[in-house]
Amino acid sequence: MSLFGRLEELAVPEILHVVSWGEKTGSLTLTRGRAEGVVVFRRGRIVHAASNSPREALGTILVCRKFVTEETLMRAVEEQQRSASGRCLGAVLIAMGALSAKTLETAVRQQIEQVMAEFFLWESGHFRFEPVELPERSALDLERSDIRVERGFNTEQVVLAVVKRVDDARRREEEHAAASRRSVPRPSGDARPQPLPRPTPRPGAGDLETILAGLQSPALRGEAVLTILRHARGLVRRGVVFAPTHRGLAGIGQFGVEIAGTSADERVCELLIPLDQPSVLADVTAKRGSYRGMLPLSFWDDFLVAQLGGGRPREIVVVPAVAGADVVAVLYGDNLPG
């Protein structure tokens, strides 16, 4: 039985309920303008979800949640590249004894929820569900960038988790918006906020541009993000990689960030900088050009350094990774602490 229509008439959660209740096996395709997504079901359970927008990769989730260390992930990537059989990253990590199948499934569930959260915000567009017979799988089948699980996840439980995730994100956005309406205190003396200079390549920023030029896919793989961070360590003392999402620039990786009393990885993974508010990150993303200089005076620039532990760096560098016409990642770096 095929099912198709407009999202204005049937919202994504309602579509998922229909497929779940009917224990359908097949593929749900969602489109909204240039944005596309797919959810695959086996007997009403979700086994796969993906979209063509930038998203946090499996490797990044594993490191940010401290399921594996960065060094372990890089060893697994190297082993994967040497493997003649083309084994997927998840299978390599399990074979190394670095990860259990249960932990890997937890990370897969988190990635699926992140993808689904984007779909839940779509209030317009089209959908089509087509029955498709899926081959039975005896183990986790982890492809290079997207994930399928044999038994799948309970769709109703995923819906509840995603609704909570979306509600929490909206509440944080409302809190940030309320905070941004408050005036930012100016420093003493004659200093005044200055217009953000036009981003231009500078020494150091150019080196980072070379590093980021290797990113050619909107699906940021964990190994690509880790490679960026590893090379950037030689140029700045601390750095954060952001990925553009429908809600803004989301933190997906870091190095050198020190925050008293909390995990730097967890703090960075919760970071969200809006693209429709003034900030150096938003400006670099819009102009697709690098910036090196003083941190501008704006609420969101102050918010960023406050979230990274406080202090005001003398100089920052912000470099976008551009693939085609799209910015697929943004690297922020400075020389704090020190």
Image (spheres, rainbow, N blue to C red):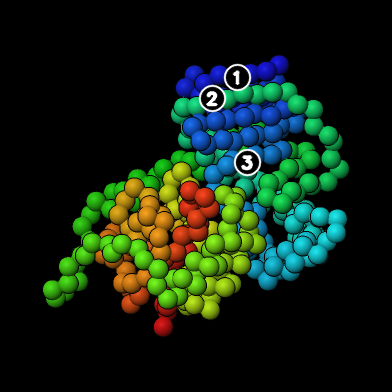
Going by the numbered disc 1, the residue's amino acid type is Phe
Residue carrying label 3: 50
Residue carrying label 2: 126
User: What crowding class fits label 2: few (fewer than 14 Cα within 10 Å), some (14-19), or many (20 or more)?
Assistant: many
Give the mark nearer the N terminus: 2 vs 3: 3
**Residue 137, percent from left and from top:** 84, 40
Left/right of residue 28 with respect to residue 87 in the rendered view = left
Residue for point 57% across, 49% down: 218
Q: Looking at this view, is 211 or 132 the one in front? A: 211
* Badge 2 vs badge 1, beta-carbon distance below 8 Å: yes
State whether residue 186 appears in this view: yes
**Residue 99, percent from left and from top:** 75, 60
Establish if 261 lies above or below 225: below
| Cα gap from disc 2 to disc 1, whole angstroms | 8 Å
Q: Looking at this view, is 39 or 170 the one in front? A: 39
Mark linked to residue 302: none
Residue 186 in which image quadrant = bottom left
Q: From this viewpoint, which residue is outermost toward the top? A: 1
Give the mark nearer the N terminus: 3 vs 1: 1
State whether residue 261 appears in this view: no
Establish if 175 lies above or below 251: above
Q: Looking at this view, is 217 or 310 the one in front? A: 217
Residue for point 51% across, 43% down: 165
Establish if 333 lies above or below 271: below
Q: From this viewpoint, which residue is outermost toward the bottom? A: 338
**Residue 174, percent from left and from top:** 35, 45
Establish if 294 lies above or below 120: below
